[in-house]
Structure formats: C-alpha cells, structure tokens
Amino acid sequence: MKTYSAVIIEDEAMYREHLTELLQNGFPEIKLLKTCCSGEEALQQLPLLAPDVVFMDIDLGDMNAFDVIGQLNLSRTRLIFTTAYTNWAAQAFQVNALHFLLKPITKPDLREAIDRLEERHPAVEVKELLANMHQFTHQTLAIREKKAIQYLIIADILFLEADESYTKIFYLKKEDVASITTSQGLLYFEEELQKHGFLRINKKYLVNSQYINSYNRTDSTAELSSGHLLPVSRSKRYLFM
C-alpha cells in the first residue's frame, strides 16, 4: 500500500479535529505530519515539511488558500480543498475534477478524494485553480437561475429582498442598479453573506452595510446610497444605535 505524508490547514478547531480523527482512524495510507491553524503558519511549515498531500480550507481567517498557493511552490504537492460553503461554486470545482470536500467531511467523500490522488498531475490542478480563483471563491456569489448559474461580485450587491419562496437580488451594474431573481431562499443567502457585512434588517430584507447612508429614527428606515429606502423592524433597530 502506497503511503502519503499529509498536512491539514484549517483555522477552525472543530473541523481540524474532525478531519484528523477521520484520517487517523480510517486511512492508514495517510501519515499526518502536522495541522496548521492559519495561512501564516502554513506558509512557514509547508516548505519545511514538503508533504505529499495538503488538506486546505479555503477561508483560513488571516488569508485564503489562494494567497498561500500563490506564495509557495506546490507543484509536487497534491491539494484537497475543504469548505463549509455550500454554494454552486463548490460544484464547479467538482465538475473541473479538482479535489474538493464540503464540510462536515464524511468518510466516503474523503475516501473518494484520497483514491483520486494519482489521477492528475498536481501542477495542472494548481494552474487551473489559480486561473479560476476569482470566479470560484466566496468573493463571488453563485445565483441559481432556471437554465444557468450567474456569478455576482459580493461587493456589488446592494440588498436582497424575499419574495415568498424566491429572492430578488439588487446589485450594481456599471452605473445602474440591476436585479436578478432566484428560487434560493433569503435564509440561504443570509448564512452565506453575514461575514461580508450584510445585515438582516427585517424578515424581508438583507442589506450590504457598506451601502447604508443613513438611518431615519422617525419612520425607522435605512437609506442606501442607491436611493432605496428600506424598512427596519423594531427588533433590528439596535443595529443602528
């Protein structure tokens, strides 16, 4: 049985411990050398350890996986990426035959990824990944339409509006405001966008805080730089105090 030396790069202890336990208890072909909890630690340790395979979270807190890849020569290292983001970008990685695992990682999925280690030359994987990094990281949001998937730059999104079981997304397009409607619910987007500064101001609206110009206490509305006036529920007024 061929063995592989490995390093885990994961900033969240829960996921780091879970993957460590899976590897140690079910994959004797993987020899775990070290776990790293940040991108900076990864930059220091990977050149010293030179592992055969790296299990790397996309969002490392202090930087993302692509920042690490861009600064190191990993042409001889096989990369298996992990993420908690369940958007369509993850499926795009899988279509491109890149090793990509969604958290929480299951033993069958991990087995499939490890079994595929020899399928492609790692240098090709890194080259393709870097070429598409702007499209497939969580700096863009994948919007599912009936016949296609559209990618929006998160920084360009003004706000999202719930419309029964649908969501209408308003975003900047050149100097205008455009919109797109998707069957994905507002709760899904709230979970995806909270860390990007989006605020749930009532049951119907999720707003990009960078575009909030002012808050009117009299009628409890938030005015956006686009001119939109959105109502703020009583339970969410604390966000503007």
Image (spheres, helix red, strand yellow):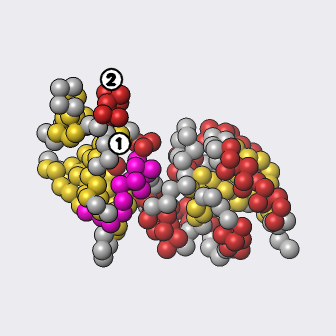
Residue 26, magenta (yes or no): no
- Magenta residues, start to end: 181-193
Quadrant of the rendering where the C terminus is positioned: top left
Magenta stretch encompasses residue 190 = yes
Badge 1 density bin: few <14, some 14–19, many ≥20, Cα 10 Å: many
Residue annotated with mark 2: 241
User: Which quadrant is the N terminus positioned in?
Assistant: bottom right
In the picture of the structure, the residue carrying the numbered disc 1 is: 200
Q: Residue at x 28, y 61 (%)?
A: 164
Q: Secondary structure at mark 2?
A: loop
- Does the image show residue 210? no
110 horizontally vs 204: left or right: right
Label 2 – label 1 distance at C-alpha: 15 Å
Q: Quick one: which residue is furthest to the front in this view?
A: 234
Residue at (60% x, 48% y) in the render: 72
Q: Earlier in the sequence, mark 2 or mark 1?
A: 1
Q: Which mark is residue 214?
A: none
* Residue 145, quarter of the rendered image: bottom left
